Image: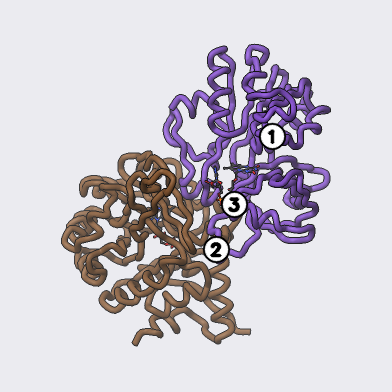
Chain colours: A brown, B purple
Amino acid sequence: MSEVSLKVNLLGKELAGPVIGASGTFGFGAEYSDIVDLKKLGGVSSKGITLIPKYGNEGERLLETPSGLINSIGLQNPGVQHFIDHELPIMETLGTAILANLGGGCIEDYEKGAELLNDTAVDFVELNISCPNVKQGGIAYGIQAESAKEVVSRVRAVCKKPLIVKLSPQAEDICRMAVACVEAGADALSLVNTFQACAIDLEKRRPVFNNIFAGLSGPAIKPIALRMVYQVCGVVDVPVIGLGGIATGNDALEFIMAGATAVQVGTANFMNPKACETVTDEIAAWMQAHGVKTLDEIRGCARV
Amino acid sequence: MHATACDVKVLEHLALTDTIRLMTTSWPRRDKAPKAGQFFMLRCWPADVAPVLSRPISVHSYDAAMGTIQFLYEVRGKGTEKLAALEPGDTLSLVGPSGNGFDVESALGKRVALVGGGIGTAPLYQLAKELNAGGTKADYFCGFRDEPYGVEKFATLCGKVQLATDSGRYGFHGFVTQLLNPEEYDLVLCCGPEPMMKAVAKLCEEKGVTCIVSLERKMACGIGACLGCTCKTTTGGKCVCKEGPVFDSKEVFGA
Ligand SMILES: Cc1cc2nc3c(=O)[nH]c(=O)nc-3n(C[C@H](O)[C@H](O)[C@H](O)COP(=O)(O)OP(=O)(O)OC[C@H]3O[C@@H](n4cnc5c(N)ncnc54)[C@H](O)[C@@H]3O)c2cc1C
Ligand SMILES: Cc1cc2nc3c(=O)[nH]c(=O)nc-3n(C[C@H](O)[C@H](O)[C@H](O)COP(=O)(O)O)c2cc1C
């Protein structure tokens, strides 16, 4: 039997596999250390952190939908400095790449947060300009290419780490957005964040979520996320990390064949706590069965 | 200690009432022994089948020698209906043990009351066992809407056992709070519907008695990764699944 290699080179760093635990669903990685073999993963993206600690949203935070989940967490986090002092040292022991998912309110907060992360063990900064659950959670920057360009170039100017910009599917034009972020200095892109969604509580005759709208994730969004990743891979030359509803090896392979360098798995972790490992193993099994030795052989192969 | 994930076998599954089930499963991971007040995320349906999320259920009883866990649960909706269909020999996925659990150590030697409401009595049995093993016999107060369940087995573990029902068909006709005099205790440990826990906490507070409660929240990951179950506390937001579900009532109801 031929050996398959799942290794991925992301911006010069060799990742053990193509699957990264998605921000907000994988804690700071340690929570999964006795559940998943983290050394098989490509990395862990931290819960979104902001310069100033945040309590997050009041009221309902979770609602199940057919094949999906609506969340309104609101970027609850202990702040960038707390992350550096307390969570990051533990992440360093996990034996996998570290993505610090950085959110923000105003541009200055993004800049200061990125600066704090400069001299740390973080491998990548994943700039979250796409959180739909905080009024100033960056979604504003995630909709219009012009405002994204401003925040990305300002962060780029101070950030010494490889910079991944995480895009929102709410962007007015996902391709223009992607190009704008790359022009502003993004080294890579990840997409998608959650889709803005809504639910009504019939008994209360009110929206379920205090913010009225909240973010939809999970298998329900996969085909749309895949469409966006396919489109973006056609207009930028930087690596693209695909995510949105990935729950199986086949799902992940679709994103890779559409052109994604790596993938992230989020909501599926709640459906199967070993999802990141399961997806990795299923990719390997598929490659084995199809005589594919490296992901480079199939990356983007479905593009027409 | 971090939670783990394990597929286990259903060994026995009993219907105690129309809606209450007692399920015994194997638990081969002796290195991850659950304690009173901790819980597991349960799932017996495939990842791609609804409901999306697994369901949190407390440890009703853990038998280290046998390597078994018991879950006492109420059939409420989609998830628990699926659990209820399990038969001996079937496989069930568990994630846990999760949560802080009750601080049994600090309760030993004290005058302790356990106060349970309905299915909230589920974690109190393991708690009574651990207290009893440490030489402390707590008093047990339980309230049910109508038909009680699982009360008898507290008799050998506890001192006084007192029962109240809303219907009056069994035990005292009224609320369990009418039976409890917190002044007789150093510590009250409580699990039940939130309004009941708030009433118990208020009684305790008036008498300056410490009241510990176990909260229930919707959960996605159950291991502290998603922050979907955060509750307000006097010291900021805390994750019910990881930093709870057991809290000092003043910390959560005062916030
Ligand atoms: C830490 C913890 C320990 C628990 N231990 C036990 C236990 O030992 N035994 C037991 O029977 N139950 C326990 N529960 C509650 C149990 O998790 C819920 O009853 C279960 O998730 C309901 O799922 P379902 O799919 O059957 O119901 P659903 O179809 O999801 O809902 C049915 C109804 O129950 C309500 N409901 C659902 N989930 C919750 C919830 N988490 N809190 C309040 N209301 C809810 C819904 O609003 C709805 O009205 C515990 C919960 C937590 C958080
Ligand atoms: C509970 C929850 C919390 C999330 N928190 C964050 C976050 O802090 N930062 C971020 O960039 N994305 C966050 N996301 C979005 C996910 O990282 C991911 O982009 C999205 O859920 C789509 O992928 P999925 O369908 O695999 O979950 C969160 C998603 C969920 C479900």
Chain for numbered disc 3: B
Query: Relative to B121, is A279 on the left or the right?
Result: left
Amino acid at pointer 2: Ala
Q: Is mark 3 within 8 Å of ligand 1?
A: yes
- In this view of the protein, can residue A140 be seen by the observer? yes
Q: Are marks 1 and 3 on the same chain?
A: yes
From this view, report whether residue A257 is shown above or below residue A168.
Answer: below
- Are labels 3 and 2 assigned to the same chain? no
The span from disc 2 to disc 1 (Cα, nearest Å) is: 42 Å
Which element is circle 2 on? helix
Q: CA distance from mark 3 to mark 2?
A: 25 Å
Q: Quadrant of ligand 2?
A: bottom left
Can you tell which quarter of the image residue B37 is in? top right
Q: Which mark is residue A275?
A: 2
| Secondary structure state at the residue bearing disc 3 | loop
Q: Is residue B237 above or below residue B40?
A: above
Residue at 58% from the left image edge and 80% from the top image edge: A3
x 54%, y 81%: residue: A287
Residue type (three-letter) at the residue carrying disc 1: Asp
- Would you say the residues marked 1 and 3 are in contact, meaning their CB atoms lie under 8 Å apart? no
* Marking on residue B77: 3
Label pair 2/1, CB-CB below 8 angstroms: no
Q: Is residue B173 left or right of residue A4?
A: right
Kindly identify which residue carries mark 1. B146
Where residue B81 appears, as percent x and y from the top left, is 64, 54
